[in-house]
Image: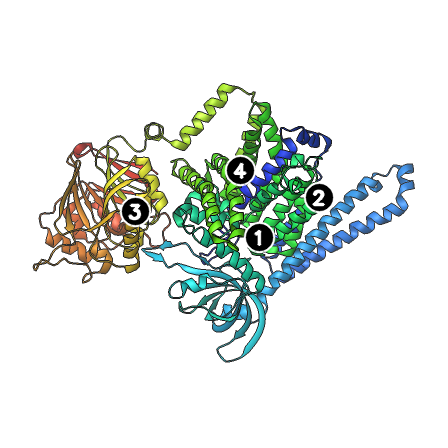
């Protein structure tokens, strides 16, 4: 998968996520729907001529799939036992069926023995076929899994040993997404799949082998050379081997390369891969001058090249379930085949559609051309399992285009699944593969019926087809998505409908750009400019959908959560079928759905009570990090820290109705306080960003500078004793403080970045006092008390360092807060907040609220009217 099959090392491995499904096959579904339930007479006649769908291959494919999924994660002897039982069972059924066929007909007619009827023999044969396919799937999986346990590589991995290895690259290099771990940002690494062919141990012994590995390279010097590597290139790598963290991973070991220098190439890529690499590079060059979103999206849309997709755009596509457009999928191929052959409803008629009859191609030549396009698609997009799966889905669509029939498509899909699982058993545990097959099956069976039902309710034909396909794909895929992602998109269906308007022109122009770039770059750049318009439209759809407050809904993860959603979906479908169509009911449902997704602040406040009217201070729920908001009047607020992730802080600010931010204060540069800065800047007018003077850690300080520069926001430094006023807010910078010689105490002498936290004493127009301590440690807290002897009791204390045990009791006694707020993540590994700190705060008379249990917290009023409202976000 590209986004879902995440290894234990936080690295993506190579398939598609939500998407190969919802749109691999949305295009496929549009094609099939045109032929099955399309408004044209040819489509209706084809549907009328066909009987029930042929499902005989479905149990065979399902048996091989299930057996392979189990066998890749079990030991060899269990696999052998399962295969033996399956073969013996199949043999018994076949022998009994043959014996009864030889001696049974006379007795059947004379004695009426039910156990020997031809129907029984057919069932016995069918069950024997199921068992034989299960045995084949388990055998293939067992043999593949055994390859991971043989040879020197897994042995060295168990010992965490170092070695010099020769590795053949088997995938395109990719960058990991930056992640916050504790207060640091995990470094970005380069990841690629490879196959070890030669091992040189530390004792000098050399072994020849073939073992798949996941290669992780630190990103640094030589990064560009690593990212330009092509599959089939042979490298010499020095590094340490480690076993996969979870069983069932498709590699024998994780190889962490030493250093960050350029790769040591010992063998060039094959001619086929060089050709594919040149074509892909040409497409990237042709799109260099496009707008950022179009430049990033078009290579992904055409050949699955996601190297330019940034975290923000990727998050938008995930929130709207449009990630299938960022990966190689059957829809890419289907669009081109539709251009060649035309709509499937006309494929079997004398007057065919598409370009083929217009340029004089016969049916046979057209079929060969379609096969050639499929082969070229596999070559350019890499012949790895995910691309082969996409090609198989595209060939199913080709069958639909060629015949205009539905009945032959289910057997074709089942046969494709069976062959792919036997070829690559790891697909049996692939999240993207499951979604792709489920969506394709739904689009072949459910979508035509739903489209026809919508058409009967006077929905226009093309809209009914597109809407039926999107609804069917979402209905079957959403329960699987929540199993792994613990969330569901409420805007997936409309986002897919709007995006599909641009997918075909973007794909066709993109493939034409790919071809032209190899021979005439100026023309390719011009065509890329044309393709950039629909590509930009798709990106805008994703960003607009993700920006809606109700774009995503949290849902319990795991299989129980998936089963619950599947049950609710089934009940809703049954209810809709039984409900008599009423225009007023439809309008009411649509209006309610719109309110849920848009969530206007007044309506959300009336329904949920959050945010409370008149809030003056809010602590957002951002996980293990800090993000607080000070109301400055109207839709304006001052934000102090941004948390570890852009998504939750952006959601919190949207719920609070904050559109203007005169000032963002970043207390220090730890990642759990600054990594969410893009979420604060997203769609808001920001005046300036203020930081502490100690730029440590340097990488995260550089991240803040880059983010501010990209947004065109001024970066300023907090001065000791500085006073500011915004609207009804007034505050003073208490720390870092200036020494006797006027120099700022940077924090380096007392504890590093935490002790350099910008500390604010805030007063509101209503008289509320707040002390925001950042992550000050006890030495700095004591120094703060000495530097400000005038400091006295406050109404609200933002407890330092997520309520850790490292607090100065003297400072707590001095400020004696009425309300103490702690920002901490659920089930964090640090034990925050500390029971000792909570006890000390309560002993001083404070009411304590914590985001890990109470959610976001808002403060209303002042003095005797001070109220804390938990539970938001």
Q: Which residue is under mark 1? A: 387
Q: For numbered disc 4, what is the local secondary structure?
A: helix
Judging depth in this view, the residue of 750 and 409 nearest the camera is: 409
Residue identifier under label 4: 474
Sequence-wise, the earlier of marks 3 and 2 is 2
Which of the two labelled residues, at mark 4 and mark 3, occupies the earlier sequence position? 4
Q: Is residue 553 left or right of residue 622?
A: right
Tag of residue 312 = none
Residue 739 location (% of width, % of height)? 10, 58
As displayed, is residue 598 above or below residue 296? above
Q: Nearer the viewer, residue 116 or 603?
A: 603
What x and y, as percent, mark residue 721?
A: 12, 50
Label 2 neighbour load within 10 Å: few <14, some 14-19, many 20+? few
Q: Quadrant of residue 49?
A: top right
The answer to whether residue 834 shows anywhere in this view is no
Q: Mark 2 = which residue?
A: 362
Instruction: Specify which label sits upstream in the sequence, 2 or 1.
Output: 2
C-alpha span from label 4 to label 2 = 38 Å
Q: Secondary structure at mark 3?
A: helix
Circle 3 packing at 10 Å, graded few (<14), some (14-19), many (20+), is: few
What residue would you read off at disc 3? 711
Percent position (x, y) of residue 18?
A: 51, 45
Which badge, 4 or 2, comes first in the chain's sequence?
A: 2
Q: CA distance from mark 3 to mark 2?
A: 56 Å
């Amino acid at each position: 998968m590209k986004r879902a099959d995440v290894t234990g090392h936080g690295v993506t491995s190579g398939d598609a996520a939500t998407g190969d499904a919802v749109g691999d096959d949305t295009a496929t579904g549009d094609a099939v729907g045109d032929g099955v339930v399309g408004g044209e007479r040819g489509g209706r006649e084809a549907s009328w001529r066909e009987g029930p769908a042929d499902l005989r291959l479905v149990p065979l494919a399902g048996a091989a799939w299930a057996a392979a999924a189990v066998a890749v994660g079990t030991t060899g002897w269990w696999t052998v036992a399962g295969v033996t039982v399956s073969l013996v069972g199949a043999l018994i059924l076949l022998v009994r069926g043959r014996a009864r066929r030889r001696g049974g007909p006379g007795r059947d007619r004379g004695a009426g023995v039910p156990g020997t009827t031809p129907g029984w023999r057919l069932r016995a044969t069918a069950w024997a076929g199921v068992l034989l396919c299960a045995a084949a799937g388990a055998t293939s999986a067992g043999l593949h899994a055994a390859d991971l346990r043989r040879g020197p590589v897994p042995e060295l991995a168990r010992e965490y040993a170092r070695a010099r290895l020769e590795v053949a690259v088997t995938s395109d290099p990719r960058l990991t997404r930056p992640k916050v771990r504790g207060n640091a940002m995990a470094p970005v690494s380069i990841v690629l799949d490879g196959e070890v062919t030669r091992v040189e141990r530390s004792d000098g012994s050399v072994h020849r082998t073939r073992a798949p590995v996941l290669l992780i390279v630190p990103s640094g010097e030589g990064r560009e050379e690593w990212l330009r590597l092509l599959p089939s290139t042979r490298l010499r790598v020095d590094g340490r081997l480690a076993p996969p963290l979870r069983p069932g991973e498709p590699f024998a070991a994780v190889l962490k390369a030493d250093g960050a220098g350029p790769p040591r190439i010992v063998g060039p890529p094959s001619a086929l891969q060089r050709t594919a690499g040149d074509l892909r590079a040409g497409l990237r060059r042709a799109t260099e001058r496009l707008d950022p979103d179009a430049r990033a999206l078009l290579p992904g849309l055409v050949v699955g090249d996601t190297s330019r997709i940034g975290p923000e755009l990727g998050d938008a596509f995930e929130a709207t379930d449009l990630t299938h457009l960022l990966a190689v999928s059957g829809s890419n191929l289907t669009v081109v085949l539709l251009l060649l052959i035309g709509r499937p409803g006309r494929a079997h008629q004398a007057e065919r559609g598409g370009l083929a009859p217009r340029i004089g191609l016969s049916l046979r030549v057209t079929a060969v051309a379609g096969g050639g396009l499929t082969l070229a698609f596999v070559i350019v997009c890499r012949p790895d399992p995910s691309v082969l799966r996409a090609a198989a889905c595209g060939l199913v669509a080709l069958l639909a285009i060629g015949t205009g029939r539905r009945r032959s498509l289910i057997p074709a899909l089942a046969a494709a699944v069976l062959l792919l699982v036997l070829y690559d058993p790891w697909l049996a545990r692939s999240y993207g593969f499951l979604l792709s097959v489920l969506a394709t099956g739904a689009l072949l069976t459910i979508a035509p019926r739903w489209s026809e039902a919508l058409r009967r309710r006077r929905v226009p034909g093309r809209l009914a087809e597109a809407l039926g396909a999107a609804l069917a794909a979402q209905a079957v895929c959403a329960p699987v998505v929540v199993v792994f992602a613990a969330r569901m998109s409420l805007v997936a269906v409309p986002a897919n409908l709007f995006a599909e308007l641009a997918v075909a022109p973007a794909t066709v122009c993109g493939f034409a750009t790919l071809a032209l770039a190899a021979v005439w770059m100026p023309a390719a750049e011009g065509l890329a400019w044309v393709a950039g318009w629909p590509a930009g439209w798709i990106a805008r759809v994703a960003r607009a959908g993700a920006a809606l407050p109700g774009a995503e809904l949290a849902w319990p993860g795991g299989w129980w959560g998936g089963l619950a959603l599947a049950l609710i979906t089934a009940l809703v479908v049954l209810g809709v079928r039984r409900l008599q169509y009423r225009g007023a009911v439809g309008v009411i449902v649509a209006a309610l759905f719109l309110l849920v997704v848009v969530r206007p602040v007044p309506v959300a406040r009336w329904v949920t009570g959050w945010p409370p009217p008149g809030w003056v201070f809010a602590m957002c729920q951002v996980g293990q990090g800090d993000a607080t908001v000070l109301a400055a009047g109207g839709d304006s607020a001052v934000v102090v820290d941004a948390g570890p992730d852009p998504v939750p802080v952006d959601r919190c600010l949207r719920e609070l109705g904050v559109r203007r931010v005169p000032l963002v204060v970043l207390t220090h540069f730890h990642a759990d306080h600054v990594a969410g800065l893009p979420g604060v800047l997203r769609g808001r007018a920001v005046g300036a960003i203020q930081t502490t003077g100690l730029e440590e850690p340097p990488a995260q300080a550089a991240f803040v500078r880059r983010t501010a520069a990209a947004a065109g926001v001024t970066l300023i430094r907090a001065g000791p004793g500085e006073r500011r006023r915004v609207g009804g807010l007034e505050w003073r910078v208490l720390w870092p403080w200036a020494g006797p010689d006027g120099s700022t105490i940077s924090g380096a002498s007392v504890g590093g970045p935490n002790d350099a936290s910008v500390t604010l004493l805030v007063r509101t127009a209503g008289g509320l006092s707040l002390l925001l301590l950042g992550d000050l440690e006890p030495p700095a807290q004591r120094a703060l008390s000495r530097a400000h002897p005038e400091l006295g009791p406050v109404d609200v204390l933002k407890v330092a360092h997520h309520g850790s045990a490292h607090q100065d009791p003297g400072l707590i006694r001095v400020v004696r807060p009425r309300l103490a707020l702690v920002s901490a993540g659920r089930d964090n590994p640090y034990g925050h907040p500390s029971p000792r700190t909570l006890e000390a705060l309560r002993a001083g008379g404070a009411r304590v609220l914590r985001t890990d249990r109470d959610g976001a917290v808002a403060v209303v009023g002042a003095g005797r009217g001070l109220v804390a409202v938990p539970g938001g976000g």
